[in-house]
Image (cartoon, rainbow, N blue to C red):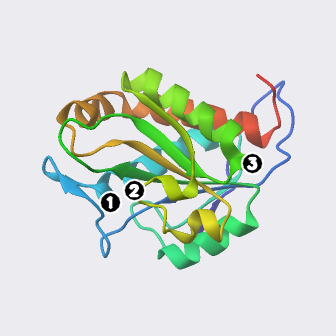
Amino acid sequence: MRWVTEVAAVPARSEQTRTVMISAGHSNTDPGAVAQGVTEAEIVLEFRDLVSAALARHGIRHLTDGEDGNNLPLRQAACLAAEADIAIEFHCNAATPAATGTETLSRRDAFPLAGRLCVETAAILGIANRGAKPENAGQHHRLAFVSDGGGIIHELFFITNASDLGQYQQYREALADRVARIIAQAARDDKG
């Protein structure tokens, strides 16, 4: 686990009122889905680190589930999520090569934030918005991150879809910044 406390000074912004935790859903010991020559673990570890850097630039103190390029086992990440006001774990979906889009899995009370993540991810990557869904609606539904931790699982795109993956690879930095902005607004309880 790593607290990111060295953040950029952000003038003329409201103070952070909610704690934030972000997590990569897979690791070297659990690579997740494998397709198109990459693993889900490679993608979500990279993305978590990009979002962490962007959160720091936006002045948000936050906790990650490990040092750069590494993460904790799911059980430990779920415990950390349970202690945070906002907890988001990144994953990739996998299905047929034609399946596309982004979605989130969460408790119903997290649907507003989860829905914003879906809208913005779909817009940046130019893929379908599959929406904010309850915990039992996706392939990662058995993960304790939602049921025990109260967090949001953000399925960024389908790793099995070459176009989705290409869009992610092209726009990952813009997506990380947009996701960080959404989280920052929620952490400050900003309405914008």
Alpha carbon separation for disc pair 2 and 3: 26 Å
Tell me which corner region of the image, top left, top right, bottom left or bottom right, holds residue 85.
bottom right
Q: Quadrant of residue 68?
A: bottom left
Residue sitting at 57 percent across and 35 percent down?
A: 117
Please, what is the three-letter code of the amino acid marked with disc 3?
A: Asp
Q: How crowded is mark 2: few (under 14 residues within 10 Å), some or many (20 or more)?
A: many
Q: At which x and y percent is residue 160?
A: 21, 45
Q: Which residue is drawn at 62% across and 67% down?
A: 147
Instruction: In this rendered view, identify the residue nearer to me: 48 or 2.
Output: 48
Secondary structure of the residue carrying numbered label 2: helix
Q: Is mark 1 on a helix, strand or loop?
A: helix
Q: Residue 9: tell me if it is visible.
A: no
Give the total number of marks visible in the rendering.
Answer: 3
Q: Mark 3 points at which residue?
A: 109
At 76% from the left and 22% from the top, the residue drawn is 192
Q: CB of mark 2 within 8 Å of CB of mark 1?
A: yes
In the rendered structure, the answer to whether residue 93 lies left or right of residue 33 reads: right
Q: Is residue 183 above or below residue 139?
A: above
Q: How far apart are marks 2 and 1 (CA)?
A: 6 Å
Q: In this view, does 113 lie to the left or right of 71?
A: right
